[in-house]
């Protein structure tokens, strides 16, 4: 029966259950599995059907040693759920291989020359590596159509108040040191600043926090929406990866993150977003308005092209990215450049 099912072309994998009946001993079950698997494996690599066995039914725990079938060993599990979980990655890999790869999407209007100029200037000043300042980040990302919410740098209290008044209340004020990974951990962010007195008090408090590069960044406060974290990371084997994850204070606890090789196709961007467990929050979860998913996908594509064009970009961290019904807002952006093995043209 196993061999018949395997050769039928109607199944992709098989789980054989050993029901403890007197007519079918453990030895007889193993012989049946061994015979069937030898027949399946002899039909050629393109016809092989993965097989797992289960040795528990009706509360009886059977043997869990693998069944030897020639050069192959068929795993045996205690419960059907265990076998299904073991075979699931094979199914996902087969689906991935069957998906057309698509061609890397283009980024219209990308100014590669301007981006390379930023890289040259930064690495000329710091040959090994350096985190970019907010203006440098805006220039680099802007060359690929990625806009960060406008802000102004301030060195002192009154300068910060003037910047807030110029940008228009409400504003957000934060520590400007680009080497700080999580400003909130240091108490380095103030939200909902609605008037000059509030701006003055926030600036005084923030400037008392010791940092490597003193200074403040003042930005117009964005309206709320679903939060994402989008970025670029370098992998020693695969090279630049574009990452996307659910944002907010609990992002590390949730661990909801996807990865795609750069550069990305439109299919890559769409699947990276939709494979997140929290993706329903972008698609009108419980009556909420649907977010601008196309804008997020375009952001992923732009980052992938940037990472592929500029190997000196060691890390990019856009956190948070607030997604609205129409468009999105990148509220904070960090970029680390490091000397790579490729030169900048």
Image (cartoon, grey):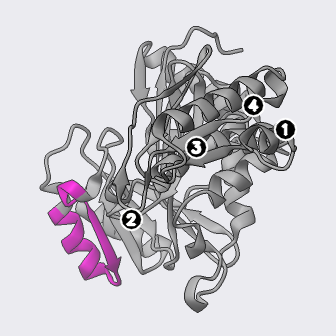
Residue at (50, 14) in percent of width and height: 339
Secondary structure category for the residue under label 1? helix
Q: Earlier in the sequence, mark 3 or mark 1?
A: 1
| Gap in angstroms between the C-alphas marked 3 and 4 | 44 Å
Mark sitting on residue 112: 4
| 122 sits left or right of 288 in the view | left
Q: Which residues make up the magenta segment? A: 185-205
Mark sitting on residue 140: none
What is the crowding at mark 2: few (fewer than 14 residues within 10 Å), some, or many (at least 20)? Answer: some
What is the crowding at mark 3: few (fewer than 14 residues within 10 Å), some, or many (at least 20)? Answer: some
Q: Is residue 44 above or below residue 99?
A: above
Q: Position of residue 42 (x, y in %)?
A: 79, 20
Q: Which residue is mark 2?
A: 248
| 254 sits left or right of 101 in the view | left
| Gap in angstroms between the C-alphas marked 3 and 2 | 33 Å
Q: Earlier in the sequence, mark 4 or mark 2?
A: 4
Mark sitting on residue 87: 3
Residue 230 in sight:
no
Which numbered mark, 3 or 2, is in the foreground of this view?
3
Residue at (63, 37) in percent of width and height: 51
What is the crowding at mark 4: few (fewer than 14 residues within 10 Å), some, or many (at least 20)? Answer: some
């Amino acid at each position: 029966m196993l061999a018949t099912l395997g050769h039928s072309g109607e199944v992709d994998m098989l789980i054989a259950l050993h029901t403890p009946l007197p007519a079918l001993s453990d030895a007889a079950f193993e012989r049946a599995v061994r015979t069937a698997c030898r027949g399946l494996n002899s039909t050629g690599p393109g016809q092989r059907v993965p097989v797992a066995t289960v040795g528990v039914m009706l509360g009886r725990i059977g043997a869990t040693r693998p069944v030897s079938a020639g050069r192959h060993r068929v795993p045996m599990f205690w419960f059907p759920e265990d076998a299904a979980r073991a075979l699931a990655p094979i199914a996902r890999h087969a689906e991935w291989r069957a998906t057309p790869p698509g061609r890397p999407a283009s980024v219209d209007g990308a100014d590669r020359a301007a981006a390379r100029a930023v890289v040259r200037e930064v690495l000329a000043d710091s040959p090994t590596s350096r985190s970019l300042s907010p203006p440098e980040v805006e220039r680099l990302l802007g060359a690929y159509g990625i806009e960060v919410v406008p802000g102004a740098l301030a060195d002192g209290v009154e300068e910060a108040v003037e910047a807030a008044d110029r940008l228009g209340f409400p504003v957000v004020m934060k520590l400007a040191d680009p080497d700080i990974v999580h400003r909130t951990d240091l108490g380095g962010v103030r939200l909902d600043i609605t008037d000059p007195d509030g701006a003055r008090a926030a600036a005084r408090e923030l400037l008392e926090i010791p940092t490597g590069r003193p200074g403040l960044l003042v930005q117009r406060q964005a309206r709320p929406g679903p939060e994402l974290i989008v970025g670029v990371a370098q992998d020693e084997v695969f090279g630049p990866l574009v990452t996307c994850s659910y944002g907010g204070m609990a992002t590390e606890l949730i661990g909801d993150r996807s990865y795609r090789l750069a550069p990305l196709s439109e299919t890559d961007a769409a699947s990276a977003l939709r494979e997140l467990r929290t993706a329903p929050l972008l698609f009108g979860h419980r009556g909420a308005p649907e977010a601008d998913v196309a804008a997020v996908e375009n952001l992923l594509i732009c980052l992938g092209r940037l990472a592929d064009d500029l190997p000196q970009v060691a890390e990019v961290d856009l956190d948070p990215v607030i997604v609205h019904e129409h468009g999105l807002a990148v509220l904070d952006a960090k970029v680390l450049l490091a000397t790579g093995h490729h030169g900048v043209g």
